[in-house]
Amino acid sequence: MKKRHASRGTKQSQPGYHCRGRIWIENNGETFLGFGRVVLLELIHEHGSISQAARSMEMSYKHAWDLIDSMNRQAGQPLVTTNKGGRGGGGAKLTAAGQKAIKIFARLQQRLAVFLSQETKKLGL
Amino acid sequence: MKKRHASRGTKQSQPGYHCRGRIWIENNGETFLGFGRVVLLELIHEHGSISQAARSMEMSYKHAWDLIDSMNRQAGQPLVTTNKGGRGGGGAKLTAAGQKAIKIFARLQQRLAVFLSQETKKLGL
């Protein structure tokens, strides 16, 4: 499996005190992008299929579809488009907006990791 | 009720995209301080009693005690001391280490709020 941008990067067990954190993006108080949603987008990009992406992260197709629908609706444009019918029907791919969402979230997580590392150094515990 | 330092501060519903986050401190991979633990410490300080503090946050006495035990053990010194027996037995109070833990976590949450606000401005969504 390809290395994914999204990473729980802050979950290792290390000796001593460490700051840990989680970040997500809300839109009008509703979750727009979070770790699970971004992993789903990345897996759709890898597999070209919502059902295969969902299966590979042990998520139901319905839940995966609800998350995609929530992201598409909130963004006002699709992050994922599906190709119903035809040979190999059910194919799905990311739009430019979907790829941008992955990049934005990856940068956010990188900066959170830097912040947590700085705070860990300052802890004074 | 007195204003508490600990605040979920990042939970309001606001129009547009916003970065939200949660922070906690681990020690050797185990949670040492997080939002719920710090609220518990603050309530023990207010009420002078573990059972009253637990009740006021709808937590069982056992769970509250497990959290305190986990903090005391990890810190290598008590954050909360109890006065068993005697008149009004069961009284509890924070030690200097307990008060320091609250302050450290409050500052961490303040800096997280600043970080999230900066990231919200940079989102580009």
Image (tube, coloured by chain):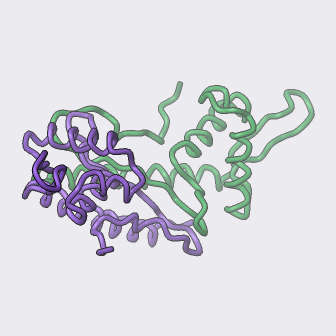
Chain colours: A green, B purple
Measuring from the top left, give residue A96's x and y in whole percent. Answer: 66, 53
Residue for point 47% across, 42% down: A6
| Residue B20 left/right relative to A14 | right
Farthest residue in the front direction?
B87
| Left or right: B24 as drawn, with respect to B58 | left
- Viewer-proximal residue among B63 and A91: B63
Quadrant in the picture for residue A40: top right
Percent position of residue B101, x then y: 17, 56
Residue A122 seen anywhere in this rendered image of the structure: no
A84 with respect to B24 (left or right): right
**Residue drawn at (67%, 62%) of the image:** A75
**Residue at 65% across, 56% down:** A97
The extreme right residue here reads A86
Name the residue rendered at 12%, 55% in the picture: B87
For the residue pair A10 and B22, the one nearer the viewer reads as: B22
In the image, B49 versus A68, the foreground residue is B49
- Report whether residue B96 is seen: yes
